[in-house]
């Protein structure tokens, strides 16, 4: 998330996530298999003002 925010702050028009298989499959570093979903929620969910 920090690197996504740095990219945004520097004016990047987008980002690329590598190791897609790791982000969607359960494993030692991603026990629930929800890493990509957590990234989406943390970095890309826009909340309505005041919420």
Image (cartoon, rainbow, N blue to C red):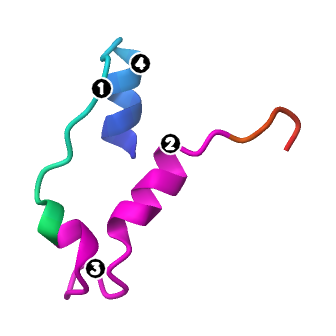
User: What's the residue at 38%, 74% (across, down)?
Assistant: 34
Residue 8, horizontal then vertical, whole percent: 39, 22
According to the picture, the residue beneath numbered tag 2 turns out to be: 44
Q: Name the residue carrying label 1.
A: 14
**Residue 46 in the image: above or below residue 8:** below
Image depth: mark 4 or mark 1 in front: 1
Quarter of the picture containing the C terminus is: top right
- N-terminal of the pair, mark 3 or mark 2, is 3
Mark 3 or 1, nearer chain start: 1
Answer above or below: position of 34 versus 45.
below
Q: Position of residue 27 (x, y in %)?
A: 20, 87
Find residue 30 and name its label.
Answer: 3
- Which range of residues does the magenta coloring cover? 22-46
Spatial separation of the CA atoms under disc 4 and disc 1? 11 Å
Determine which of the numbered discs, if any, sits on residue 9 in the image.
4
- Please tell me which residue is depicted at 88% across the width and 36% down the height of the picture: 50
Q: Given this view, does label 3 or label 1 mark the residue nearer the observer?
A: 1
Q: Are marks 3 and 2 in contact (CB under 8 Å)?
A: no
Given residues 34 and 29, the one toward you in this image is: 34
**Picture layout, residue 45 above or below residue 48:** below
Q: CA distance from mark 3 to mark 4?
A: 28 Å
Direction top: furthest residue? 11
* Category of crowding for the residue at label 2, using alpha-carbon neighbours closer than 10 angstroms: few (below 14), some (14–19), many (at least 20): few
Mark 3 burial class by Cα count in 10 Å: few <14, some 14-19, many 20+: some
SS assignment at label 1: loop
Label 3 residue SS: loop
Q: Residue at x 52, y 52 (%)?
A: 42
Quick one: label 3 or label 4, which is nearer the N terminus?
4
Please, what secondary structure does the residue beneath circle 2 have? loop
Residue 38, image x and y in percent? Answer: 45, 63
Q: Is residue 16 left or right of residue 6?
A: left
Q: Earlier in the sequence, mark 1 or mark 2?
A: 1
């Amino acid at each position: 998330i920090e690197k996504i925010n740095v990219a945004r702050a520097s004016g990047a028009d987008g980002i690329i996530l590598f190791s897609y298989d790791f982000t969607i499959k359960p494993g030692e570093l991603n026990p629930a298999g929800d890493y990509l979903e957590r990234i989406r929620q943390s970095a890309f969910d826009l909340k309505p003002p005041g919420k």
